[in-house]
Image (cartoon, rainbow, N blue to C red):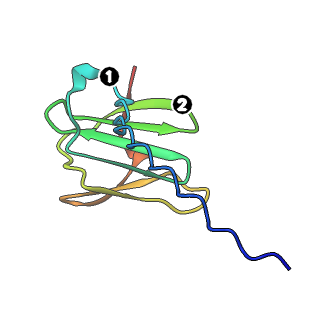
């Protein structure tokens, strides 16, 4: 039986490249959303100054007039349209006006 040979020294790790932030998926003219998020193949962004809510579901983008609602979150049940948490309680996305 031959004696074990010493291990070769490990090569130093290369420095990691900085991660790039993801590009916004909403139009730049809307600015920064006050809240955004997503779940179950849907994502949203709310722009209070423009009174706009953007919802993208499976790659299809819809823009809604949020009116006086101040959106702070979302809830979604299987197969149902999302509801958004507002200062006055939950509002179903189907109750908002779709913008062209």
* Nearest to the observer: residue 54 or residue 21: 21
Looking at this view, name the residue that lies furthest to the left: 49
Q: Is residue 61 toward the left or the right of residue 1 in the image?
A: left
Q: Can residue 94 be seen in this view?
A: no
Q: Which of 29 and 85 is in front in this view?
A: 29
Q: Residue at x 36, y 39 (%)?
A: 19
Q: In which quarter of the image is residue 30?
A: top left
Task: Count the labels in the image.
Answer: 2
* Disc 2, SS: strand
Instruction: Name the residue at 24% across, 50% down.
Output: 71
- How far is disc 2 from disc 1 in space, using C-alphas? 14 Å
Residue at image coords 39%, 43%: 16
Sequence-first tag of 2 and 1: 1
Q: Where is residue 47 shown, x and y percent of the image?
A: 22, 36
Q: Residue 27 carries which label?
A: 1
Q: In which quarter of the image is the N terminus?
A: bottom right
Q: Residue at x 69, y 68 (%)?
A: 5
**In this rendering, is residue 47 above or below 85?**
above
* Vertical side of 1 occupied by 25: above or below: above
Q: Is residue 89 visible?
A: yes
Whole-percent x and y of residue 12?
Answer: 44, 50
When asked about the image quadrant of residue 74, the answer is bottom left
Residue 79 image offset from top left, x and y in percent:
61, 56
Specify the quadrant that holds the C terminus.
top left
Q: Which mark is residue 60?
A: 2
50 on left or right of 62: left
Give the secondary structure at mark 1. loop
Is the residue marked by circle 2 packed among few (<14), some (14-19), or many (20+) residues within 10 Å? few
Crowdedness of circle 1 by 10 Å Cα count: few (<14), some, many (20+)?
few
Q: Which mark is residue 73?
A: none
């Amino acid at each position: 039986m031959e004696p074990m040979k010493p291990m070769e020294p490990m090569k130093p790790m290369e420095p990691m490249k900085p991660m790039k932030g993801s590009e916004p998926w909403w139009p730049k003219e809307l600015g920064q959303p006050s809240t955004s998020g997503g779940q179950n193949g849907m994502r949203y962004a709310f722009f209070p100054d423009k009174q706009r809510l953007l919802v993208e579901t499976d790659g299809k983008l819809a823009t809604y007039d949020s009116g006086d609602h101040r959106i702070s979150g979302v809830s979604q049940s299987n197969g149902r349209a999302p509801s958004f948490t507002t200062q006055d309680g939950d509002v179903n996305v189907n109750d908002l006006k779709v913008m062209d």
